[in-house]
Image: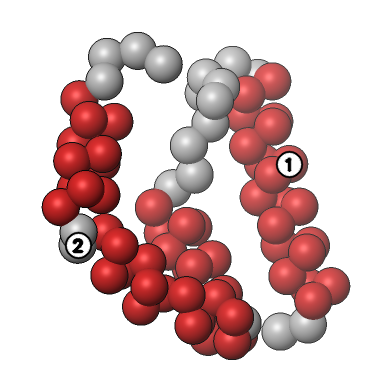
Amino acid sequence: MTLVSKAWKALEELLKACNMIWEGRVEAPYKLKPYVILRAYTEKMVGDPVFRATVPNTLRYITTRRAGTQILARLRRRSY
């Protein structure tokens, strides 16, 4: 898949979200569907060596006690 076709797919997804917000079918901020996010991360991981190198470091960070505490605090927060 070329960079141009990836950009077009991203723009189409953005336009679809904007139209749904404009028509009042969803509220902003709009959350992407989990399969869209998973597909984007998978494509990024397969195609980008820099991103692929940071994945193990991210997983190592998430498993630390401090990161776990921070994640739980953000999930339990009632307002932003």
Q: Amino acid at mark 1?
A: Leu
In the image, taking residue 77 as reference, residue 9 lies left or right, namely right
Tell me the mark number nearer the camera, choosing from 1 and 2.
Answer: 2
**What is the x, y in percent for residue 41?**
49, 68
Which residue is rendered at x = 71% and y = 62% of the image? 9
Query: Can residue 47 be seen in the rendering of this structure?
Result: yes
Q: Is residue 51 above or below residue 58?
A: below
Q: Quadrant of residue 77?
A: top left
Q: Return the residue found at the far front.
A: 66
In the image, taking residue 5 as reference, residue 30 lies left or right, namely left
**What is the x, y in percent for residue 73?**
22, 30
Element type at mark 1: helix
Which residue is rendered at x = 41% and y = 59% of the image? 35
Q: Name the residue nearer the viewer: 35 or 47.
A: 47
Tally of numbered tags: 2
Q: Name the residue nearer the viewer: 52 or 41.
A: 52
**What is the x, y in percent for residue 16?**
67, 41
Marked residue nearer the N-terminal end (1 or 2): 1
Query: Can residue 25 be seen in the rendering of this structure?
Result: no
Element type at mark 2: loop
Q: Compute the Cα span from label 1 to label 2.
A: 36 Å
Pick the quarter of the image with the C terminus. top left
In the image, taking residue 63 as reference, residue 24 lies left or right, namely right
Which residue is rendered at x = 55% and y = 76% of the image? 51
Q: Name the residue nearer the viewer: 73 or 42.
A: 73
Which residue is rendered at x = 53% and y = 31% of the image? 30
Look at the numbered discs 1 and 2 and tell me whether their residues touch, using CB distance below 8 Å: no
Q: Quadrant of residue 10?
A: bottom right
Q: Amino acid at mark 2?
A: Thr
Q: Which residue is mark 2?
A: 63
Q: Name the disc covering residue 15, or none.
A: 1
**What is the x, y in percent for residue 62?**
26, 59
